[in-house]
Image (spheres, helix red, strand yellow):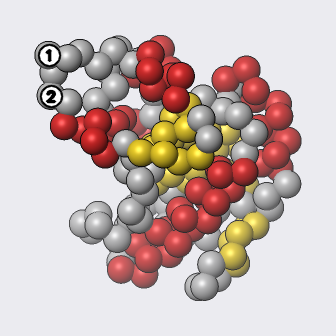
Amino acid sequence: MAFDFSLWIHAGDNTEQVGTFLHTHTSIETKLNQYNLHLQTHKNHHLLKTDQVSQVGIRSLQDAHEMSLIGFEFLKILLKAPPFHYAMVGLGLTKWRDLHEFLPYPKDLLLTKGFVVREDIYNKMEISADTDQSFRSDIGFFRNGYLWIPYIGEWEFPF
């Protein structure tokens, strides 16, 4: 299984505008380093990442610290991004699903730190009153029209 540390954005019908916006972000800077960014586009989603961090997961405290700082910079970019459907920052994005795959089964994504979703899409998720609702208390305001499960960084992950 490959691990990618990245910002994944599902842009929906706004793919071109989001892509144009992301192309203007060629690097980010943290207190540790400056990182070159690379953008990959697949149909209606974009993947923004750097190859200057581990591509095989967290192997040290330094990896975790570096990825956490990059993650916070990715979220700053997302705060200014044109409208999108949903996004996620973090490791292991191989578990990513398309909208039609997670709307009926939202709990997995709604437990994922760093998941950002447009409010109207969140409201379409099939969250039954009969199921455990405790995970819903973790979702909060990200920016106008968007909710999120707050990103707490990668240092919590074991390695």
Neighbor class of circle 1 (other Cα within 10 Å; few <14, some 14-19, many 20+) is: few
Of the numbered discs in the image, which one, if any, rests on residue 130?
A: 1
The answer to whether mark 2 and mark 1 are in CB contact below 8 A is no
Q: What residue is rendered at 19% in x and 37% in y?
A: 134
- Can residue 39 be seen here? no
Q: Amino acid at mark 1?
A: Asp
Left or right: 87 with respect to 90?
A: right
Residue under the point 47% across and 69% down: 68
In the picture as drawn, the residue positioned furthest to the bottom comes out as 32
Q: Relative to the observer, which residue lies in front, 74 or 81?
A: 81
Vertical relation: 67 (above or below) 89: below
Q: Quadrant of residue 151?
A: bottom left
Marks 2 and 1, how far apart at CA:
7 Å
Residue 22: x and y in percent read 77, 48
Q: Residue, x 40% and y 72% (percent of image)?
A: 64
Residue 141 percent across, percent down from the top left: 48, 45
Q: Position of residue 105 (x, y in %)?
A: 31, 20
Q: Quadrant of the C terminus?
A: bottom left
Where does residue 4 sit, x and y in percent of width and height? 50, 52
Residue type at mark 2? Asp
Mark 2, residues whose alpha carbon is within 10 Å: few (<14), some, or many (≥20)? Answer: few
Q: Which mark is residue 55?
A: none
Residue under pointer 2: 132
